[in-house]
Amino acid sequence: MVLYGDEDVAVVDEDTAAGEEGEEDGDEDEGEDDTSTSSAAVPNLYRFDQGHATQLSGPNMLQQRAADRRSRNQMARELVVGDFVLNDSTDPNQPLWLGRVMSNPEWDGAGKQTNNSNRVVRYKDDFNETITVNPEETALYIIWYERIDVNSRELNYHISRTLVKPFVQSNYYFVHGGFDMHCTTRGGGGNPVPKERSTTRGGRSRSATTSATSLGDYARPRQDNQTSFEAWHNKEYGLVWKMDHSTYELALSRVGEYE
């Protein structure tokens, strides 16, 4: 429970206050013996607001935090290519980062890879930074989106203008995924994420996009056939996606939950 002071109040000892009052009376009326003191009613100085507080220590917290991690890890394992995800962010203007699971040809077209070993797995990204994936966590192949106007109440996003390629990310900061996004651009709903596989022909390795009939676990409606990531990205660049406020608020309530 948190106490909030409505205003700054100087706290004075009651006996001291009475003594000072007596001295003032004595200065005004010398010789008059006024030994009476009065006790003014103490006003209610505080407002009491009751709210939820996250428990950080105490009985059963180790078990609870382990359960939270299992929940987060389980959600990440259920993601499929094309799913939108929200990650915890350190950016004060965008406390949540929106991303989308993409097909990684090095993972045989999958968008995720779970670390089922008892060792830490590390990946290098295009910036030569190391991505650490702990046991039972899942590496996700994510392309990022940007909120168009952080000062607007509308939750409108478009694909990142600066980070134009997918990156391997740990699900460590993952807070929500698999939710619906609404394409507000006319005629832009039919842009499914292509699923790419790494194939070998004549001793040469290449990245190829499969046909629409082999998208496997891709669970989003398909209206167009994509032939490459570049073709998909060119179309996606002009699309605007809107997020429901309930989705945003749910994810925001989970920020910092797994730290």
Image (cartoon, rainbow, N blue to C red):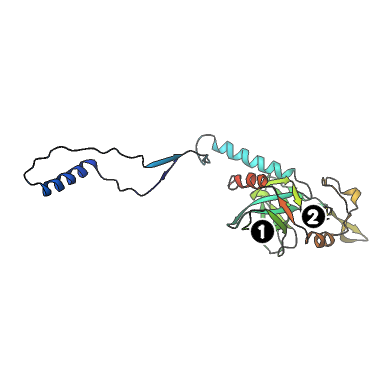
Residue under the image location 75 percent in, 61 percent down: 165
Residue 46 seen: yes
In the shown orientation, is residue 204 left or right of residue 237?
Answer: right
Residue under the image location 77 percent in, 58 percent down: 239
Give the SS element for disc 1: strand
Q: CA distance from mark 1 to mark 2?
A: 18 Å
Q: Which mark is residue 130?
A: 1
For the residue carrying disc 2, how many other residues have a C-alpha within 10 Å: few (<14), some (14-19), or many (20+)?
many
**Image coords of residue 191 (percent x, y):** 83, 54
Front residue of 71 and 28: 28
**Image coords of residue 249 (percent x, y):** 63, 46
> What residue would you read off at disc 2?
104
Residue under the image location 58 percent in, 40 percent down: 65
Q: Residue furthest left?
A: 31
Tally the marks.
2
**Image coords of residue 257 (percent x, y):** 59, 44
Identified by mark 2, the residue type is Asn
Q: Which mark is residue 55?
A: none
